[in-house]
Image: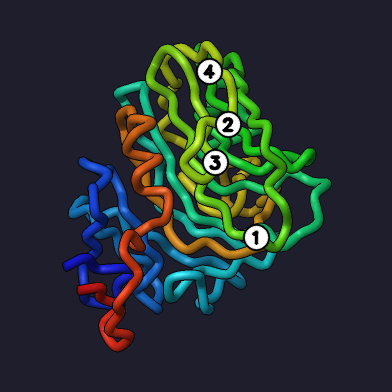
Amino acid sequence: MYILKPLPGILPMPARPLADARSLWPMNSLGNPIFDLSGNGKKGTMVNDVTWGAGKFGPALNFGGFVDYVNFGYWNNPSGKASFVAHVRFDRAIGSNEQIASADKTNTPNSRSLQFRRSAAGKLQLITWTGNVAKIITGTTTLTTGLCWWVAGVCDGVKSYLYVNGISDATPVASGSMDNDTNVHFLLGGRDTNGDLLTINDGLLGRMDCFLRFDHTVSASEIAYNREPFCMFPEPIMPEFGIAV
């Protein structure tokens, strides 16, 4: 039995789980805060006009594109490695940066850890900082507006990698170990420019069905196998539970 996108109170069970998630947010709690199903208790607070709506696999978060975001508290990643996996749809025309996730106090030196975003050119991009120097990897696929994308960014402490719909989307780029600034907020859907949660830039206009965060390297095979979150065997379905049997 495989659980698809679970309803509240029902845990997800992918066909081959992405192991040891630091945080697992399937966007199914239908309330505020957003619950973390990894067991690590990293709840997220919806701020401003983030709302619940219909997603591809069940409930999803809708972001209004300006000062809307989810705050998961202060960033802390002492390993210098991280992986991010998301199922997201962009509803704004390509032309501006839109953050999927960030831990970046842009206006404060030495307080920058990451940006995971669709760039103004419409490409997936992961930016990490090592010794306060930005390390940027940019994908090749155009993340077309109005479509759902299964995206992943990985920094293994040596190189960075990008994946779109389970397939490598860029030549790996030398990154080094990520800086770990614990004075910046980890946000979904925006970037906290001044560190005071008053100036939010690069807002996401779109929908997010799930987000997973890891403090280690997720392999290419894991990402490829789990390219549709919690939806491995969609038939037959018991709609009242979201369960395939």
- Taking depth in this image into account, of 235 and 194 the one nearest to the observer is 235
Marked residue nearer the N-terminal end (4 or 3): 3
Disc number at residue 172?
4
Instruction: Tell me the SS state at disc 3.
Output: strand
The answer to whether residue 185 is visible is no
Residue 75 shown left or right of residue 16 in the figure: right
Residue highlighted by disc 2? 169
Q: What residue type is labelled 3?
A: Val
Q: Residue furthest front?
A: 236
Q: Is mark 1 on a helix, strand or loop?
A: loop
* Residue indicated by mark 3: 164
Q: Is mark 4 on a helix, strand or loop?
A: loop
Whether pointer 2 and pointer 3 mark residues with C-beta atoms closer than 8 Å, the reply is yes
- N-terminal label among 2 and 3: 3
Q: What residue type is labelled 4?
A: Pro
Residue for badge 1: 147
Q: How far apart are marks 2 and 4 (CA)?
A: 9 Å
Task: Report the quarter where the C terminus lies.
Answer: bottom left
Q: Where is residue 190 in the image (x, y as percent from the top left)?
A: 61, 51
Q: How far apart are the two marked residues, 4 and 1, measured between alpha carbons?
A: 25 Å
Q: Which residue is drawn at 33% across and 85% down?
A: 239
Circle 2: is it few (<14), some (14-19), or many (20+) Cα within 10 Å? many
